[in-house]
Amino acid sequence: MKKTHIVGIVIIAVAIAIIVSTYGNSSTYATFAEAKETTKELHVVSHLVKEKPQHYDPIKDANYFSFYAVDNKGVECKVVFFGTKPQDFEKSEQIVLTGGMVGSEFHASKILMKCPSKYTDQGSDLKEFSSAPKSTSL
Amino acid sequence: MDIQFVGEHLLPGKLGQFFIVLAFGASLLSTIAYYFQTVKDKNDLSWRQIARWSFRIQSVAVIGIIASLFYIIYNHYFEYNYAWSHSSKTLPVEYMISCFWEGQEGSFLLWAFWQVVIGNIIMRTAKDWEDSVMTVIGLSQAFIISMLLGVEFFGHRVGSSPFILLREAMHDAPIFKDPEYLVKYITDGKGLNPLLQNYWMVIHPPTLFFGFASMVAPFAYAIAGLWTKRINEWTKPAIPWALAASMVLGAGIIMGAFWAYEALNFGGFWAWDPVENASLIPWLTMISAVHVLIIFKNTGHSYFTALFLTLISYILVLYASFLTRSGILGETSVHAFTDLGMMGQLVTYLLVFLVISIVLIIIRWKKMPFTEKEESIYSREFWMFIGALVMTLSCLQVIGFTSVPVINKILGTNIAPPLEPVAFYNQWQMPFAILVAVLLGFSQFMKYKKSDTAKFWISTGVSLVMSIIITAIIAYFTLFSGLKTVYGNAFNGSENFNWMFVVLIFAAVFGVLANLNVLSDAIKGKFKLTGSAIAHIGFGLMLIGAVVAASQNKVISINTSGFDYGSQFDAKNKRENILLWKNEPMKISNYTVTYLGDSTKGVNTYYRVNYKVLDEKNNVKESFDLYPLGQQNPTMGLVASPDTRHYLTHDIYTHVSSVPKKETDEEHMEHQGHNDDEEYEKPVTYKVSIGDTITFDEGKVIVKGINRNAQLKDIPLSENDLAIGIMLDVVSNDDHKVTPVEPVYLIKNNAVFSFAKKMDEFGLKFKFVNILPNEHKFEVVMLKKPGKQKDYIIMKAIVFPYINLLWSGTIIMVIGFAFAISRRVKELRATSQGKDKKDKQLA
C-alpha cells in the first residue's frame, strides 16, 4: 500500500467523523414538555409571557432573574436565568433558551433574544446572554 | 401628480448613482476587452488599450461613489436612506468612515475599492499575465459593483444602491405625502451602532476586506494559467499574492479578535461565531495553498492540490460573503448583516466562479502534471503536505458546522446548534492545532526531496528534550501554581485544567524551538527561510497565548454576598456578576474594588471603578481606575463596552452588566388619575418656611428660598399666570454633596398645577402643592422610594493571564509574512529579469 493511500484513508476517516459529529450528534429545537422528559440540556424556542410577573432584584441578587415563557406548543413554564436581566427584555419577540428542567422550573444558562431591529423594519436583532463561563481554549 | 419635496439635495445622489452605473459599465467593458486581448492577436494591442482605460475610468468612478456617499453622510442629508439609517448629527467625523461598513452597500463599496487597488497594481506589474489575469479581476469587479446597482431588470431588482432616498425606501409611509416631510419630521438619523464607534472598528473592516479582496489575485492567476495553457507557470507570481492575502486577512481577523476583546462584552477574543468563522475559513485554505504552492515550486509534486486550494480559497470567500450577507445565518449569529434580498445575486456570483473553475480543470486535466513517484518520508514536502491537509480538515470542520443553517434551508431540516458550540469547536480544533504545531516544527529539520536520516533524528531529539523542559516551565506558570503570580496567593489550582492544554503547549514550544533553530541559521547567512521561521514562531506563540488566555481566564467578580438560593445551583451556575454600591468598597480576589460614580460624555456614560491592591498592613500597594462604558441606547438597551487594565503578564477586564436606568430630568406634570407615585412610599406633607430642614435616612433637605420667576420648559406663561419655584438643597450625609432641586407651583387660567421634581440618587421626589400666605409657609410633599436608592452598578471582572503572548505572537507572524513576501517578490524579479535577458539575447 502506498503512503498516499494511507494518508487518503486517514483523511476520509476524519472527514466522516466530522460529518457524523456535526449532524449525528445534534439536537433539534425542543419544547418544555420534551425538556421534562430528559435530564439533558436542550434548546427551547419560546416567547415571553408579558402578563406574568418577572422577578429581578439586583439589590438582593444580581444574578437571579425569573420570568414565564410559553413554547411553540403553547406550554407555559417558569424560567430561571442565573445572570443579569437583559435590557429591553420586554421588547423581545422570541427567546431561545438553553438549559434543562429542575423540578418545575426551567433553568437557563443562555438566552438568545430576538428583538425588533433598529436598522431594518422587517429584520431583527439577536442578542445573546450567557451566565455560564465561555468554554475554554482556542 | 408629482409632489415637490422641500429641502432635498438630489445632486450628490444622482452623481453617485451615475458613478455606480459608470463603474459597472466600465468594469464590464474592461473584462470584455481584456478577454479579447487574451484570445486574439498578440501584435494588435488596441484591445488592451481599451481595457486599461476602462479599468482606469472604473477606478475613478469607484472613488466618485465613495466621495458622493461620504459627502451625503458628512452633510447629514437624511433624505438619503443610507445616511438616515447609519449616521446621525452627533456622530464624530472619524466614525463617519465606520458608517461605510455598517451597511451592506458600504461594505461592498469597500470591497470594490480594494479590488481597484489590486487591479491597478496587477495592471502595472503583471507584464505578460496582465490580459488574462485582469479578465478575471474585471469580472469579479463587475459582480461586486452590480451589488450596488439598485436597478430593475425585467422586474427583478439587481443590487441595492446606497443612494436610495428615504421616501423611496419606505414609500408607503404616510409622512412622505407631505412635501415638507424632511423639514418637519426627519430631523436626525438613526445613528451608528455604538459598538462600531470604536477606533478598532475604523481599521479592522478595511483590513479584513483588503484580505478578502486580495484573495482574488492568486485565484485569477490560477484561472489565467489554466486558460492560457501556462499550466505550471502561474504558481510563481501567485505565491507572493497568496502570501500577501494570508497576511492581510490574518491581520484583519486578529484585529477583529482584538476589537471583540476591547469593545464587546462577551468576555473573550474568539467565540466561534459564524461571522468570525466565515473569515477564518478562506484564511485556512489560503495558508494551506501557500504551503502546497511552495512544495510544487520546489519539487514539482502536488500540483493539483495547490491548484485546488488556490481556487477554493476565493470560492470560499464568496461563500463566506453569501453566509454573512444573505441573512441565512439569521437564527445562529449575533452579528450577521440582515437580508437585502440579494441572495440570488450572491449565489450567482459564487456559481459563476465555481463553474469557470470546474470547467477549466476538466478541460486542462490531461495537461496537468501528476507525479507517480512517491515522496520520501524523510522529505520536507511530505510533511508540509500533511500539514496543509490537516489545516484543510480543520477548515472542513468549521465549514461543516457553520453551514448548518444552509443545510437546514436546503433540506428543510431543523437541526439546532450544539449546546456548547465553543466547547464543541475546541474539542475538534485542539488536536488539529497540536498536529500543525508539531509538523511546522520537525519538517524544518528536513530538506526537500531527501534528508539525512541520522542528522534529522539528532536535531529533532535535541529539540524534543529541550521542549519538554521549557514546556514544564511554561505550564507551571500558565496552568499550575505559577498562576499565583497573576491571581495572588489565594489562588488554589485551576478547575479548567485539561491535559490537552499541556500537549498543545508542548507542541507549540517544539514548533517555536525548531523554527528558532532555523532563524539562527538565517542570521548566519541563510536568509531564505527567515520569513517562514518568524511566521511559524509567531504562530506557535499565538497558540500558547490563546490556549492559556482562553482556558485559564477567571471571573473574579464572584458574588459571595448574594441571596442564597440553595447550593444546588452554585456548582453549575457561578454567580459572576457583583453589585457595587457607590463608594462602598468590596473585596474581589486580591483587589478592593469601589464604584466611584459616573460621568457622561455625549451618548456614553463612563462608570469609574477603582481597583486597589492592599498589603497585610492595609497600605495601598497599587491603585488604578477603570472606566467601563455603558450607553443607554433607546433602541438597543444597554450597550456596554469593557475597560481593561493591561499588565505584561495579564489583563484585568471589567464591564458593567446592568445599571439603574437613568431618569430624565424632565418636569413631570401631574395629571389627575395618573401618577407614577406607586413606586414610592406614602407621601409626607411638610409645612415649611425658608431656612427649614427636612431630614431623611441618607441626608437632609434645606429650604433655600422662593423663585418668583420660575420658568417651565415647553409652557409659555402669560401675564396672568403665576409660576413659583421653591429652591431646595438636598445634602448627602456621606460626602456633603449638594444637589439643588426646584419643584414649581403654577396657576394658569385659574387652574392649579404642581410640577414635581425628582432627585434620583436618593430616590426622592418633591412636589410644591400649596402656598399658605397667612402662615408665610409653603406646603411641600416629599416622596421617597423604599430601600436604599443609592447609585450602584452591576459589573463583571475577568482576569486574562498571559494574553500578551497571543497578541505578540500574531504581530510576529505578520512580520514573518512580510519577510516571506519580500523574498518571493525578489525571486520573481530575479527570474523575470533573467528571462528578459534571454529574450534580448535571442532577439
Image (cartoon, rainbow, N blue to C red):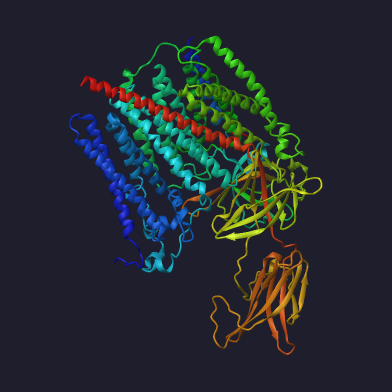
Q: Is residue B209 above or below residue B229?
A: below
Residue B773: x and y, percent? 71, 88
Q: As rendered, which of B664 and B261 lies closer to the eye?
A: B261
Quarter holding the C terminus of chain A? top right
Q: Is residue B650 left or right of residue B691?
A: left
Q: How far across and how far down the image is residue B55, in percent?
A: 28, 41
User: Which residue in the rendered view is the most extreme toward the right?
Assistant: B617
List the single residue furthest toward the bottom: B774
| Residue A79 seen | no
Horizontal placement of B131 versus B389: left or right? left
Q: Relative to the observer, which residue lies in front, B436 or B579?
A: B436
Residue B411 picture location, percent across and down: 46, 35
Tally of numbered discs = 0
Q: Quadrant of residue B462?
A: top right
What residue is at 73 percent from the left and 81 percent from the top? B690
Visible residue check, residue B91: yes
Q: Tell me what residue is drawn at x 36 percent, y 43 percent.
A: B112
Q: Position of residue B516 (x, y in %)?
A: 56, 24
Quick check: B502 left or right of B66?
A: right
